[in-house]
Image (cartoon, grey):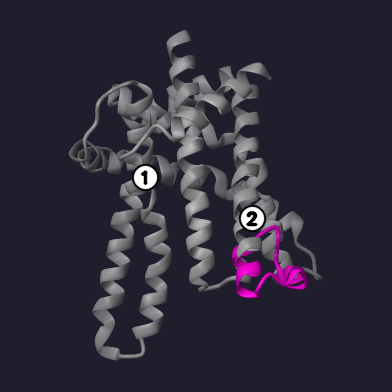
Amino acid sequence: MAEILWFLRQGWKNTWKQNLVWLFSTFPILISLFPLVQIKYGSNPGLLLLYLAGFFLSIFLAAQSYIGVPYLVYCFTMNRPTTLEDAFHAVGKFFGRILGCYLIGILVLLPCIFLMVGLSLDNSTRPPHLSNRISLLRLPLSLFIAMVDFAMFEFFKKDSGIRAALSNSWNLFISHFGVLAALGIILTVVFGIFSTASGILTVLLKSSFDLAALSQLNYLNPSTSFTGDVLFILTNGIGQMVCTVFSTSVFALAYLKYSEKK
């Protein structure tokens, strides 16, 4: 337990000592806002290019955020000076290998996800209940969050191939499964708390702080209550920015400590 608390405390401290990482962590907010712009102006058939530009820009920004954030956090944890140019270069260099790991992960987890969803369904299941049940799947999957970051750290540290990165990160993960699984669950719960808090804040602001309006909020999956709501996208996005950097900082510390032991 002491080790878990140390990772969380030190990871939280490291979260606020980094600067460049916040640029890359804002990209998911922009991606969430693109569809709103497209819906507003999409009634004009001549603006098809807007959809295409938004689509490709979203892919570009997603790659920058998904790879750039862990790369910058890893370099900070290793006390390695890093520039904006270094981060963009790392995204281009490791994109193919990280995409390959991502697709392998989907193939491995897809049967499990289908089974878990199938077992949770019944004839009475209706939205938003279905959405809530699917959201609950994040808890068992959160056991393996460390594996995702560890595989990327293997690329950053050793420039490994996909097979070597997955093998090494899996061995490291299994060797310290108890601590890493507990951290995964804790951080997933933290993500959920931030999201619910964003939903509560959005409801209160839009209803002039009418507490009765909170009864309409879907606490398990607040995003279903605010489809296309800019205020929720911004408040939730800021919370998720902090959580993402915090989570990655925690696992970067764990990777550094455990890989040195090995």
Give residue 46's quadrant in the image: bottom left
Disc tally is 2
Quadrant position of residue 256: top left
Image height of 33 relative to 38, above or below = above
- Could you tell whether 116 is left or right of 17 in the image? right
Task: Check if residue 208 falls in the magenta segment.
Answer: yes
Q: Residue at x 38, y 46 (%)?
A: 66
Question: Element type at marker 2?
Answer: helix
- Helix, strand or loop status at disc 1: helix
- Residue 173 seen by the camera: yes
Mark 2 → mark 1, Cα distance in angstroms: 21 Å
Q: Which residues are magenta?
A: 202-223
In this picture, residue 140 sits left or right of residue 11 = right
Q: Position of residue 3 (x, y in %)?
A: 61, 18
| Rendering coords of residue 243 (x, y %) | 52, 43
| Residue 48 sits inside the magenta stretch | no
Q: Is residue 262 visible?
A: no
Identify the residue under disc 1. 22
Quarter holding the N terminus is: top right
At 31% across and 38% down in the image, what residue appears? 97
Point out which mark residue 197 bears.
Answer: 2
> How many residues crowd mark 2 within 10 Å: few (<14), some (14–19), many (20+)?
some
| Mark 1 residue type | Trp
Residue in the image at 57% along x and 17% along y? 175
Side (left or right) of 212 relative to 145: right
